Image (tube, helix red, strand yellow):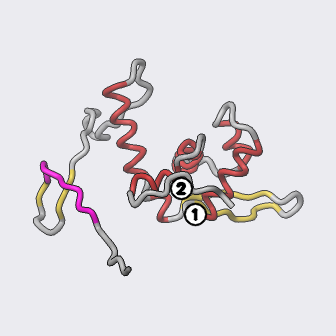
Amino acid sequence: MRETRYNLPCNIAQTLNLIGDRWTLLVLHEILVGTKTFNDLKKQLLGISSNILSDRLKHLEKSGLVRSSLYSEHPPRYEYALTESGKALEPVFNAMVLWGSEHLDPCYKKLVHTSCQHEVEIAYYCPHCEENVTQLETTVLRDEVTE
């Protein structure tokens, strides 16, 4: 069983327990952009060992972020795809690309609006008020604690 590294009541800590291991985000991103097989993932992720890739895929599948389907029985080979929960990480990857375009030198990627080719920014939207939001606040949710 995988050790829980962060035992904190924090969304960031608990998310890192799922996707914070070395290579995990890169494996997820490769599947997001369409890399489907173990061998293709290994080719795209230069430097990852087979046992680490296998471990990450098993962990992501157990965590409900990736699903596998058998496409060859002899030898057994699997295709990998993101679940809905895994696909929901796309804005996280986009935020990292945007951060990198602002803070990395050299910068390798940028996010652009397809029709005009200008860079985009992150915006927050409140569906209740139907407006973009400029002031945010984190609200702590607490379960009732019984003593």
Q: Which residue is located at x 35 percent, y 28 percent?
A: 101
Residue drawn 37% across and 81% down? Answer: 146
Q: Report how far apart the C-alphas of labels 1 and 2 lie in the structure.
A: 7 Å
Residue drawn at (39%, 39%), measured in percent from left and top? 96
Query: In the image, is 70 to the left or to the right of 119?
Result: right
Residue ranking furthest to the top? 105
**Type of secondary structure dominating the magenta stretch:** loop
Question: Which disc is residue 47 wearing?
Answer: none
Q: Quadrant of residue 88?
A: bottom left
Give the residue pinned by disc 2. Answer: 18
Horizontal arrangement in the rendering, residue 104 relative to residue 40 (left or right): left
Q: Position of residue 38 (x, y in %)?
A: 72, 48
Up/down of 32 relative to 72, above or below: above
Query: Mark 1 is on which residue type?
Result: Ser
Residue plotted at (76% across, 45% down): 51
Residue 41 placed where, x, y %? 67, 43
Where is 107 relative to 138, above or below? above
Residue interval drawn in magenta: 133-140
Could you tell me residue 92's position as x and y percent?
39, 48
Residue position marked by numbered label 1 in the rendering: 63
Q: How would you rate the neighbour count of disc 2 (Cα within 10 Å): few for under 14, some for 14-19, many for 20 or more?
A: some
Per the image, label 2 sits on a secondary structure element best described as helix
Q: Secondary structure at mark 1?
A: loop
Left or right of 53: which side holds 87?
A: left
As shown in the figure, which amino acid type bears the numbered disc 2?
Leu
Mark 1, Cα crowd under 10 Å, few <14 / some 14-19 / many 20+, is: some
Of 92 and 13, which appears nearest the observer?
Answer: 13
Quadrant into which the C terminus falls:
bottom left
Q: Are marks 1 and 2 in contact (CB under 8 Å)?
A: yes
Whichever of callouts 1 and 2 sits on the residue coming sooner in the sequence is 2
80 drawn magenta: no
